[in-house]
Image: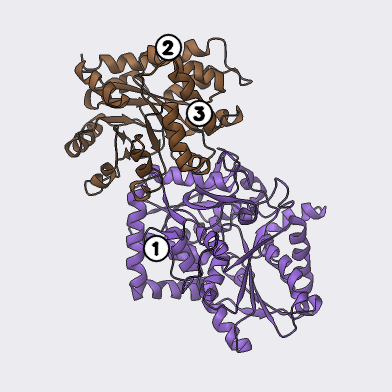
Chain colours: A purple, B brown
């Protein structure tokens, strides 16, 4: 369903929160007044210089932004093609890009007078970031996490507890990220007065997809400036991994209208997109409605949502941000997938070649870079979003490699 | 006059509130669920709300979540839910049937087809939890054009300013959600409910039914004094879960147990204003 290309890919969503037919506000009536209030509050805040100044101050002094843009010489040489640059968001406080968005939302929550923050988390990175910022501001924090993920992400669970958050293991449904999000929504429906729902990705009802994208776009804006400084031009190709899609949207959005920049999103192919066990919503799903928005979803022929699978808990989600769905249908961004095994290989490659232990999520992006870089010319530039570090993943990787820690 | 209008009018003449039951279609399997559905009117159910199972029911509490999971596991699909209505209508052409659920299975079925099939099966109204007025073009407008009622939820967070928007395209009746929260979670405060119902009735001629959190005959009776209808879901669904064997299949006494629970709630509702 490719439509005519718009004048700009950067103007969405419309006033109904739609990116083409995707997005929207598919929520229960109880939540509707809350998301309208949130939209108003966000629109006011983003006009105010003080809000932006406070956020930028914390990004700089608390998170450590701007994150470096690093030329990876040995990876480049090893792959033998395009120059590879890494946008190093894994160096942020808490070890991933998630905190960019959390800071924005919690500053907004404070402006709105909310005192209790809830969040869902899969791998635990968004949960840790939320618990961190809540601790910093003395806010009550409740994190919903699938019981399966609580088990496989123990270090992050302990981190969140140290930071004073209450962790609620979710056993409804199938006990993973999707169910954690359902449970967070149920909490929000119940505690409407004092609670702010801090969503960790570019999904959920409008205005979340646009708001989270705006907060994450700091990645792309920085990268654009840094790349011009380093090479005097824009990169030829951007690559980022996609679960819900927040790090990718943050990198991609400022580049969407730069027609010469090829943009690639990498989904988690699990054991292969031709099997039942993957998390590639765009490659293997079709449009439907879940968690407040219309987007590509993994689902059966009766519209029941399927469980996703990935070695990376952070990509283990059967949906994707609605703006990605739109960019796919508009053919502005290419979406591909890599398997668990390919991601694992890229994980070790990155450790050995650059002395960077990547999270399993960006290891997916790197696996695709390893496929395309050798085909590119040596003067071409490839920019990868290194959106998280791999400390949290060492247990999973050890198990996959058959090593005991 | 639609079945829903007729039913509320007849009950009004008797000075009774409508007793609205919620059961999940296909819980725990198609045959058991259809047999139970057929027995509901005689047990005092005035309007049947039939849940369309969905994997991710974000407004429902544990009881109804589990009911949906049992139904899906039992092989229930949206088509089978419509088949149940067709089968029910062969022996009962008067009891109004309202389908309640979430949008995705309908969207995947195809909105036009769904409306046509539901109408042909004998469905009277729809409650789709995740379609607020802001998304009326999706299903509400075409469903009403085809003669299906679109019953909207009004909640404690629906303030005076928003209420007209919620009521604008609502038909059949208004479903007032008596608590902020999920189904079956908390006990409503009858005074607050009475005030909210009165506020809604100032703005609409439609009957107002109250649900979410009504679980005992005593509560049902209190609500029946202030509202035109009482909806009970989680409590009935829990009685169904209790009447299943540990392994899953229904006990021999399944229907008797559940119907006995339904009767108590229905009788309390009917006697409330006497």
**Is residue A402 among the parts visible in the rendering?**
yes
Q: Do labels 3 and 1 share a chain?
A: no
Dot 2: what SS? Answer: helix
The quarter holding residue A210 reads: bottom left
Q: Report the Cα–Cα distance between label 2 and label 3.
A: 24 Å
* Residue under pointer 3: B81
Q: In this rendered view, identify the residue nearer to me: A291 or A219.
A: A291
- Name the residue at the right extreme: A402
- Of the residues tagged 2 and 3, which is closer to the observer? 3
**Is residue B101 among the parts visible in the rendering?**
no
Residue at figure coordinates x 44%, y 32% from the top left: B118
Residue at figure coordinates x 50%, y 73% from the top left: A218
Q: How many neighbours does mark 2 have within 10 angstroms: few (below 14), some (14-19), or many (20 or more)? A: some
Q: Position of residue A285 (x, y in %)?
A: 61, 51
* Residue under pointer 2: B260
The quarter holding residue B146 reads: top left
Q: In this rendered view, identify the residue nearer to me: B202 or B180.
A: B202
Q: Position of residue B182 (x, y in %)?
A: 41, 37
* Residue under pointer 1: A14
Dot 1: what SS? Answer: loop
Dot 3: what SS? Answer: helix
Question: Which chain contains the residue that carries disc 2?
Answer: B
Residue at figure coordinates x 65%, y 45% from the top left: A151
Callouts 1 and 2 close, C-beta under 8 Å: no
Q: How many neighbours does mark 3 have within 10 angstroms: few (below 14), some (14-19), or many (20 or more)? A: many
Quadrant holding the N terminus of chain B: top left
Q: Do labels 1 and 2 share a chain?
A: no
- Of the residues tagged 1 and 2, which is closer to the observer? 1
């Amino acid at each position: 369903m490719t439509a005519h290309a718009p004048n700009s890919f950067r103007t969405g969503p419309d006033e109904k929160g739609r990116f083409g037919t995707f997005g929207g506000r598919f929520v229960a009536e109880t939540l509707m007044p809350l998301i309208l209030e949130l939209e108003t509050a966000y629109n006011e805040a983003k006009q105010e210089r003080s809000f932006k100044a406070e956020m930028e101050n914390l990004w700089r002094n608390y998170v450590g932004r701007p994150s470096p843009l690093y030329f990876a010489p040995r990876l480049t040489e090893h792959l033998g093609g395009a120059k590879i640059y890494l946008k190093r968001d894994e160096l942020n406080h808490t070890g991933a890009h998630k905190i960019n968005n959390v800071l924005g939302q919690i500053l907004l929550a404070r402006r709105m007078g909310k005192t209790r923050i809830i969040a869902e988390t899969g791998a635990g990175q968004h949960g840790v970031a939320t618990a961190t910022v809540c601790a910093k501001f003395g806010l009550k924090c409740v994190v919903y996490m699938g019981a399966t993920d609580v088990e496989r992400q123990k270090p992050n669970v302990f981190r969140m507890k140290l930071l004073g958050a209450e962790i609620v293991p979710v056993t409804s449904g199938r006990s993973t990220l999707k169910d954690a999000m359902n449970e967070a929504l149920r909490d929000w429906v119940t505690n409407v007065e004092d609670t702010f729902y801090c969503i960790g990705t570019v999904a959920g009802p409008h205005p979340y997809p646009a708001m989270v994208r705006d907060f994450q776009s700091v990645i792309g804006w920085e990268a654009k400036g840094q790349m011009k400084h380093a090479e005097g031009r824009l990169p030829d190709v951007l690559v980022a991994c996609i679960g819900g899609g927040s790090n990718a949207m943050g990198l991609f959005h400022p580049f969407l209208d730069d027609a010469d920049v090829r943009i690639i999103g990498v989904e988690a192919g699990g054991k292969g997109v031709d099997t039942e066990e993957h998390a590639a919503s765009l490659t293997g799903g079709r449009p439907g409605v879940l968690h407040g928005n219309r987007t590509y979803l993994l689902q059966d022929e009766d519209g029941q949502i399927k469980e996703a699978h990935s070695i990376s808990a952070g990509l283990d989600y059967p949906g994707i941000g609605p703006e990605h769905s739109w960019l796919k249908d508009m053919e502005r961004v290419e979406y591909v997938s890599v398997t668990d095994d390919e991601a694992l290989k890229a994980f070790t490659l990155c450790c050995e070649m650059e002395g960077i232990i990547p999270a399993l999520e960006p290891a997916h992006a790197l696996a695709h870079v390893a496929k395309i870089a050798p085909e590119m010319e040596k003067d071409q530039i490839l920019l990868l979003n290194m959106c998280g570090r791999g400390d949290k993943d060492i247990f999973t990787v050890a198990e996959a490699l058959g090593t005991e820690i | 006059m639609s079945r829903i209008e007729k039913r509320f009018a007849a009950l009004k003449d008797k000075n009774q509130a409508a007793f609205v039951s919620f059961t999940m279609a296909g819980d725990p399997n198609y045959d058991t669920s259809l047999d139970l559905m057929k027995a509901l009117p005689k047990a005092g159910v005035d309007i049947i709300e039939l849940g369309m199972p969905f994997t991710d029911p974000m407004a429902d509490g544990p009881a109804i979540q589990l009911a949906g999971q049992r139904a899906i596991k039992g092989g229930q699909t949206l088509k089978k839910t419509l088949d149940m209505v067709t089968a029910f209508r062969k022996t009962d052409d008067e009891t109004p049937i309202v389908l309640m659920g979430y949008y995705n299975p309908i969207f995947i079925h195809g909105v036009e087809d769904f409306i046509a099939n539901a109408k042909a099966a004998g469905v009277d109204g729809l409650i789709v939890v995740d379609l607020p007025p802001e998304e009326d073009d999706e299903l509400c407008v075409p469903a009403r054009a085809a003669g299906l009622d679109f019953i909207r939820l009004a909640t404690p967070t629906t303030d005076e300013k928003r209420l007209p928007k919620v009521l604008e395209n609502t038909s059949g009746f208004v479903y007032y959600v008596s608590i902020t929260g999920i189904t079956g979670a908390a006990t409503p405060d009858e005074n607050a409910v009475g005030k909210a119902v009165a506020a809604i009735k100032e703005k609409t001629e439609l009957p107002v039914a109250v649900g979410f959190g009504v679980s005992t005959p005593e509560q049902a009776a209190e609500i029946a004094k202030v509202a035109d209808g009482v909806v009970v879901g989680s409590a009935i669904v829990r009685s169904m879960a209790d009447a299943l064997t540990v392994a899953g299949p229904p006990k021999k006494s399944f229907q008797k147990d559940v119907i006995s629970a339904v009767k108590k709630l229905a009788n309390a509702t009917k006697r409330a204003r006497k």
